[in-house]
Amino acid sequence: MNRFKAGFLIIFIAVFSSICGAEADQLITIGSFNIQHFGEEDNPERIENLARICKGIDLLAIQEVHPDGVNAVEALASALGKEYRWVVSDVTTWERFAYIWRPPLEMTDGPWLMDKPALGRKPFFAAFKAGNFEFEILNLHLFWDGSKKTYPHHRSAEFKILDDWLTYRNEPQLGLLFVGDFNAPGMFYGSDFPPPLGSAYFFYKFLNRHGLESVTLKAGIPTSIMNRNIYDHVIFNPSRHFVPEFAGHEYVEIVKWDRDWDMDGDGRLSWDEFQVARKAVTDHRLVKAKFRIDMDIPVYPDEDEENI
C-alpha cells in the first residue's frame, strides 16, 4: 500500500470513529434484569458474572432483590465502575427493587414505592434526565399467580389495575417507561392477539389501549433461560407526544448470556445446566434498549389550534 492510500485510510478510520463515537455519546442504554433472589447469600463470583453481562449499561432496573440484598446491589454497582450510583427500595411483598445508573443520567425525582397503581408489589418510581431526554420510570414485578397471601392479585387482575391507573391518571404520560418482570405473555404470539380471557390477552389489551410498545415482544426472543416465555419488558408509548427518543428496534438486545452455561453445546440448557446457570447469574435474560438524548425538546401546538 502506498503512502497516499495509507494516509487516506487512516483519515477515513479517524473520521468514521469520530462519527460513531459522537453517535454513541448521544445514546443511553436502559436495561431491565430480574436477578433471582439477588443478595440472598454472599456470592462474589455471581457479582462478577453479572457485572460482565451488564457492562456498559447506563441505567439498570433490577427486580427480585432479596430483603437482605442491599450489599449485593452496592457490590454490583462497584463492579460496574466507580462512576455508578445505586439505590434500593424498601421491602414490598418479600423483595426489593433497585436502580443502578451513571452519568450523563441524573435522578431528578424519587425514588419511592408507589401506592398507586395498587399492585401486589408496589412499583418503584424514579425520574431521570440525560441531555434533552427526561423520563419517569416504573420498575415492576407482577405476580405470577394468586394465592391466599396475595389474593386477588395475579397477572390478569394486575394488568387491569395498570390499565385503569393509566386511563385515569391526571398527570400527562410524557416520558413514562414501564420496566420489569410482567410474567406475561406465557408464550410469544407474534402479530396474533392471544386467546381471550388469558393473562396474555389482558396484557396485549393493556398495551393496545394506550398505544404502548414492548421492545421485547418486537424482538420475539424469550427472556426465560429455560423455556420460550417472554416475561421481561421495556414498555412505553413511542409516539411524538410521549417517548420519541427511542432509538429504534435495531438498538434492542435480549442478552443471551446463558449460552456460556450450555456445556454440551446443544443450543439449550439441560435441567442440570439450568440449575448451575440460575445460581451463577439468574433465571432471566437482560433486556436492553437505547434512547436518544440529543433530540430537540418538541413544542407541539395546542390540539384546538391544530383543528382551526
Image (tube, grey):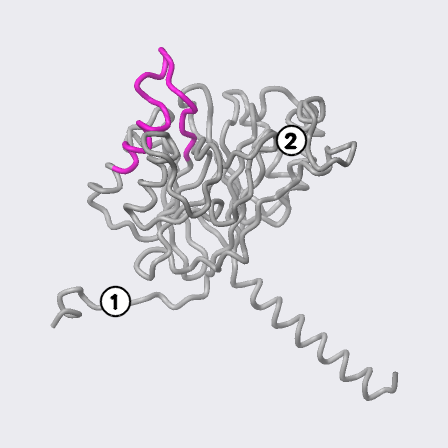
Q: Residues within 10 Å of mark 2 (few under 14, many from 20)?
A: many
Farthest residue to the right: give it: 1
> In the image, 116: left or right of 183?
left
Q: Name the foreground residue: 278 vs 97.
A: 278
Which residue range is magenta in the image? Answer: 140-163
Farthest residue to the bottom: give it: 4
**Quick one: SS at disc 1?**
loop
Position in image of residue 27 (x %, y %): 52, 59
| Image quarter of residue 260 | top right
Position in image of residue 139 (x %, y %): 42, 37
Check the image and report above or below for 162 versus 273: below
Residue 300's disc number: 1
Mark 1: which amino acid? Tyr
| Residue at 56% from the left image edge and 26% from the top image edge | 36
Q: Name the foreground residue: 156 vs 123.
A: 156
- Whether 161 is among the magenta residues is yes
Q: Tell me the distance, in whole angstroms, between the alpha carbons under discs 1 and 2.
A: 45 Å
Mark 2: which amino acid? Val
| Residue at 73% from the left image edge and 33% from the top image edge | 261
**Quick one: SS at disc 2?**
loop
- Whether 153 is among the magenta residues is yes
| Residue at 57% from the left image edge and 49% from the top image edge | 253
Q: Mark 1 near mark 2, Cβ–Cβ under 8 Å?
A: no
Residue where numbered disc 2 is placed: 281
Check the image and report above or below for 180 versus 132: above
Image quadrant occupied by the C terminus = bottom left
Q: Residues within 10 Å of mark 1 (few under 14, many from 20)?
A: few
Image quadrant occupied by the N terminus = bottom right
Q: Earlier in the sequence, mark 1 or mark 2?
A: 2
Q: Name the foreground residue: 7 vs 143.
A: 143
